[in-house]
Image (tube, coloured by chain):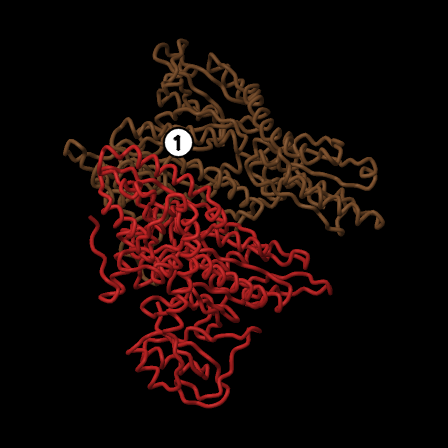
Chain colours: A red, B brown
Amino acid sequence: MAEKITPRVQDFSQWYQDIVLQAKLADYSPVKGCMVIRPNGYSIWERIQRELDGRIKKTGVRNAYFPLFIPESFLKKEAEHVEGFAPQCAVVTYAGAKDLEEKLVVRPTSETIINSMFAKWIQSYRDLPMLINQWANVVRWEMRTRLFLRTTEFLWQEGHTCHATAEEAEAETRLMLEVYTEFAENVLAMPVWPGRKSESEKFAGALRTYSIEAMMQDKKALQAGTSHNLSTNFAAAFNTQFLDKDSKQKLVHQTSWGVSTRLIGGMIMTHSDDKGLVLPPRLAQTHVAIVPILAKAEHKARVLEVSDKLAAAIQESASVRALGYDVGVIVDRDEQKQAGWKFHEYELLGMPVRIEVGPRDLEKNQVVITRRDLGQKQFVSLDEAPQVVGQMLADMQRELLQKARDFREANTHRVESYDELKKRLDDEGGFFVGAWSQSRESEEKLKEETKATVRCLPLDKEYNLIPESGPCVITGQKGNNVRAVFARAY
Amino acid sequence: MAEKITPRVQDFSQWYQDIVLQAKLADYSPVKGCMVIRPNGYSIWERIQRELDGRIKKTGVRNAYFPLFIPESFLKKEAEHVEGFAPQCAVVTYAGAKDLEEKLVVRPTSETIINSMFAKWIQSYRDLPMLINQWANVVRWEMRTRLFLRTTEFLWQEGHTCHATAEEAEAETRLMLEVYTEFAENVLAMPVWPGRKSESEKFAGALRTYSIEAMMQDKKALQAGTSHNLSTNFAAAFNTQFLDKDSKQKLVHQTSWGVSTRLIGGMIMTHSDDKGLVLPPRLAQTHVAIVPILAKAEHKARVLEVSDKLAAAIQESASVRALGYDVGVIVDRDEQKQAGWKFHEYELLGMPVRIEVGPRDLEKNQVVITRRDLGQKQFVSLDEAPQVVGQMLADMQRELLQKARDFREANTHRVESYDELKKRLDDEGGFFVGAWSQSRESEEKLKEETKATVRCLPLDKEYNLIPESGPCVITGQKGNNVRAVFARAY
């Protein structure tokens, strides 16, 4: 039998680690801070890639691949950028059995190396917009790491685009924030709050950073994706210019945007429970496990025959086809393991739907179907089962999102004063919405005194910050305040 | 207009570089030996990944991801392995603004780091076979690099498997060689010769290495993929053991196997011509470019309408659906560029099929279709065009393979003596088949004196080496000789 999973109420962080290790999603590696993504976890990443890659390509972006190594001098060309990333860099100093003349940084992000190519490829307005994405590994030396959420090496996609005008760059930045929002909600079933980052939390080298923020089951926030308007900052550093229609040389306006394997951690902490992983059907490789009850020899042939036919019928059913993704169905013929053990294992692994096919139920022409997140056994006639399964998968995807949304709404509170914020952060946790003066000092004070941060500044439909008439929650200052979300975060 | 491509007969190596750069498949980067794979090239890699990944998974292998960094001590655990790879390693010596206690090697291949995890995950025979693959970047410091063919960093897949017995490991090694062979021929349309590598050419740490060898248009060989039987060499170094059914602790028997972005270079040098890239349809993202002739305003609406209808009809046609892959069709509405310029551009980019829709042809209810590799215009009635296109793509895929096979056969020769081999290598080039004594000295002599190498030892159906009764081509030694293929290689 598998080890026991620590209950969430007892130790949320241990619960998370238990799930990741016991469901064999990932493992610690012998290299400090680096994780191994095991097949059960990697198949989730493959689904994320497929779903997101399609959405990115639909906006006209194409994939490419740039070098892992960045000459140290490149990183230094954009002043804020190097200041932000230098402390986290891993550096190659010798290679091919020789000391290198110029040290090579293992990419923490690729704005600089990509700009060196953009500067070469872009000559005229006809070359714009240039819309590129890459799926790659990046390295940021972290002191405290946590599987999927914060690792020294992680996998991600990073989009990099060039535009003729500031307006187009801002539009692209927002478009990708919207793509991430839709993707997080409809694929990961993880509701997110899109917003703008404060000045001190924006990307090193950006004019403006947008992010999507999700609430985990411990009510802490997780930044799940970012989209940056880089303005002409990197273009100026690398001289990425184009000849415009008016025959003038101009710097391109750029964006970059990314999500990473961190999404897997966010998805786990949004949906899973004390029995193990709960996986939104869109992220599953196998969706239905049929467990034939093989205890009695005389029923074996019949039970297996019905199971196989059911598996085929599920994949043919109208409700399954309507889902729009491949549905994997397995018949678990293993006779070494008992049915009870298998049920437990499928719960741990997050199999969305489990079907028991037993001789006694077959006498009544029925099977037992259990949806992973609900956990209640449902008796369904054999004829209706294929149709029910497809409907169940659609319901599960939708209801996981709704449940997470309800949880977030129930744990999002309006606050008026700093005392109230401090008390409720400790007593209840959650997201706290209130007026903020945007001063850097107040942000630092908040962080130091409460370990909470300004997660984002919510936006209206026109992407404007939302004015608040009341005094700043932290400083009490009146006038010119905007709405902010305060929370403790991963 | 694009620059001119150097003809193959004039300078094959320059021709290759011209195609890669002008078709925007890849570019040189500012990091020595590292290339940038541009969208046109990366889309080919995406097709390769999709096709090969499906084949690998069908054999029961699952994808995972292991750390980029390998502790230096790990690499040293297998003596032959470190000897083979140490001169090519790139090494991280400081990270997070501190010197590292143990240096980290950027993976040149992952046998060692993966074995450290296998040793943890594998306890019993029930855990076997363990079949893992990863798609990743690797780094091998190279002195002389060439786009796609030999770069400091490259993308690849590396499979790593563990088995209970030597027989199973050997069977897996051969199975993957067969998967690579089928894939190279049916997807890349690149005929390959599977065989065993000589002792001195095998993978550092392997018991036995198999490879697939292809012939390029300059008659040189390209090693296009390798599959290694690692025996218990790495298992012994990392103590990767399992408790067998007989209650004894035993070392696992392992394999590893890989192909890389080098395949793109091989595919280019197999099919392309002096006009540009020739792409097997299975590797194309877009298969058909419809070019409406828009010179005269009065015909524009009609020509565009017919073009759009034709595009839709092609994707619906039975012959296109029968291909088994998505066929991309574009209608080139660009009015800034002339038709002649477009034809030239599509030839350079390797668009498999081009269709001209012009007002004069439409009067005769016909269009002009040109298959990229044949280059001859064909008048086809509008009604038949959709069906013809699908057939054309199927024919092109098959005939590219046959043409390359014919070329290889025409340039493969039997040789009896060293003098003959030397003379014909210089005069004709190609693959030379003859008897070989397998002595290391003769191999070194061959390399030194002719720059040719033993590419592989061909195998019979049972994977046995093929005995040759004549004297060794290089040494003249009689008895115990086997068949070998000698050639100059990339």
Q: Mark 1 lies on which chain?
A: B
Provide residue B181's location: percent of width, then percent of height: 46, 28
Q: Does A18 sit above or below residue B51?
A: below
Residue at 47 percent of width and 52 percent of height: A135
Farthest-out residue, left: B247
Count the labels in the image.
1
Camera-side residue of B379 and A153: B379
Q: What element carries label 1?
A: helix
Q: Can residue A98 be seen in this view?
A: no
The amino acid type of the residue labelled 1 equals Met
Provide residue B140's location: percent of width, then percent of height: 41, 43
Q: Does A422 sit above or below residue B43?
A: below
Relative side of B432 to B83, left or right: right
Residue at 23 percent of width and 46 percent of height: A341
Q: Does B151 sit above or below residue A219?
A: above
Provide residue B333's location: percent of width, then percent of height: 72, 49
Residue B314 falls in image quadrant: top right
Residue at 43 percent of width and 31 percent of height: B179
